[in-house]
Image (cartoon, helix red, strand yellow):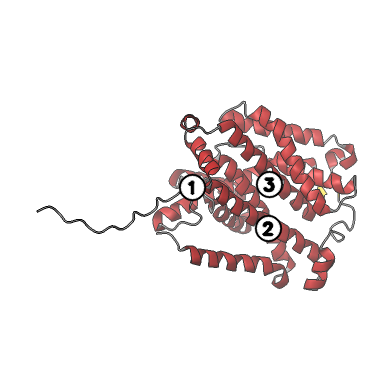
Amino acid sequence: MTLSRNSGLAAAFLVLAVLYALPAIAPRAIVQDLFGILTLLVLAMNWNMLAGFAGLVSVGQQAFVGIGAYAMFAAIILVGLDPLVGVLIGGVAAAVFAIPMAFFAFRLNGAYFAIGTWVVADIARLAISQWKALGGGTGTSLPKGTARDMLGVEQIKELLDVSSAAAADALTYWLMLSLAVAMLVASYVFLRSRMGLGLQAIRDNENAARSVGVDPVRLKAAVFLLTAFGTGLCGAIAFIQITRVTPDAAFSVIDWTAFVIFITVIGGIGTLPGPIVGVIVFYALQRLLADYGTVYLIVLGLIGIAVMIFARRGLWGLFTDRTGIELLPLRHRPPRAATTPTSRRPA
């Protein structure tokens, strides 16, 4: 059973309307919490596109987060640009960095690819820690008042009648929400296209895909660069709100890759709603178990293992199998045969 398109679109628009209106009706703490959720969601959707649809299991996505964040800080501190311009520069810088990274990593396969991306990310962290103009190994902070003077903050302050800090939080929240929506829509459109079908064919059987004219290297490289751009944008927006960057924080494998892998796996890798389900479960667990220290990480690991053993397609895949409900289906259904009059049977 598939949900009707009209009801699905109506529900989606209602949810989006509430989410966009949130800074006007909810406390600042809730907006900040949802900003963190959206940050992980964007990262999970990008990683899901790589691992779930292109078969590229990267453990080095923190490289793009860090490059995006540091490029944004450099644009503000060294050049004096507006943070919003710095965000775009952060995305471009991450995509540019992905070119030599792909040149190296694409020579590796399977587990070697995963470890190779991790190594490149750590090399990037060590190199950035030598950048004395941005604080070296101890990092640096945005100049005082940077977020307050950001383009659009004054207008939001007057519109919502809030403080400058709350207006800056609202702006970064709307930017991250818009990035998440754009990523979801672009992923759906791309995966339903001919190139998207080719990408999924490569994931399932690369040799078979090549035999029907699909170029695996070119398609994987395009996805790698595009997800690097999206991840770099996400990292730049995230560190506008954090206001301080250090190599260890910007290139954290736990915060920006390990948690993202967990979210994607438990939600449903290779499905578009999977990261959404996964990030909701992750946030709930984080709230319930955050006060228990290392027990929190142990429980996350046990849940991840249980899902991988008993629900290979994640929680969303399990839900779909049990109910038959599909959201954002990627499979093309054949058109129904035209109705023709029933011919008479021979006597």
Q: Amino acid at mark 3?
A: Gly
What numbered label is drawn on residue 324? none
> Is residue 324 at all visible to an observer of this figure?
yes
Q: Nearer the viewer, residue 213 or 131?
A: 213
Q: Residue at x 72, y 34 (%)?
A: 122
- Front position among marks 2 and 1: 2
Q: Amino acid at mark 1?
A: Val
- Whether residue 102 is situated above or below residue 196 in the rendered picture: above
At numbered mark 1, what does the secondary structure look like: helix, strand or loop? Answer: helix
Question: Which residue lies under the disc numbered 1?
Answer: 307
At numbered mark 3, what does the secondary structure look like: helix, strand or loop? Answer: helix
- Whether residue 331 is situated above or below residue 7 in the rendered picture: above
Proximity of marks 3 and 1: CB atoms separated by less than 8 Å: no
Crowd tier of the residue under label 2, counting other residues whose Cα lies within 10 Å: few below 14, some 14–19, many 20 or above:
some
Q: How many marks on residues?
A: 3
Q: Position of residue 138 (x, y in %)?
A: 84, 41
In this picture, residue 306 sits left or right of residue 219: left
Q: Tell me where residue 14 sits by quadrant.
A: bottom right
> Is residue 294 at all visible to an observer of this figure?
no
Q: Position of residue 109 (x, y in %)?
A: 57, 28
Q: Residue at x 61, y 56 (%)?
A: 283
Q: Earlier in the sequence, mark 2 or mark 1?
A: 2
Image quarter hosting the C terminus:
bottom left
Q: CA distance from mark 3 to mark 1?
A: 28 Å
Question: Which residue lies under the disc numbered 3?
Answer: 230
Q: Earlier in the sequence, mark 2 or mark 3?
A: 2
Question: Which residue lies under the disc numbered 2?
Answer: 178
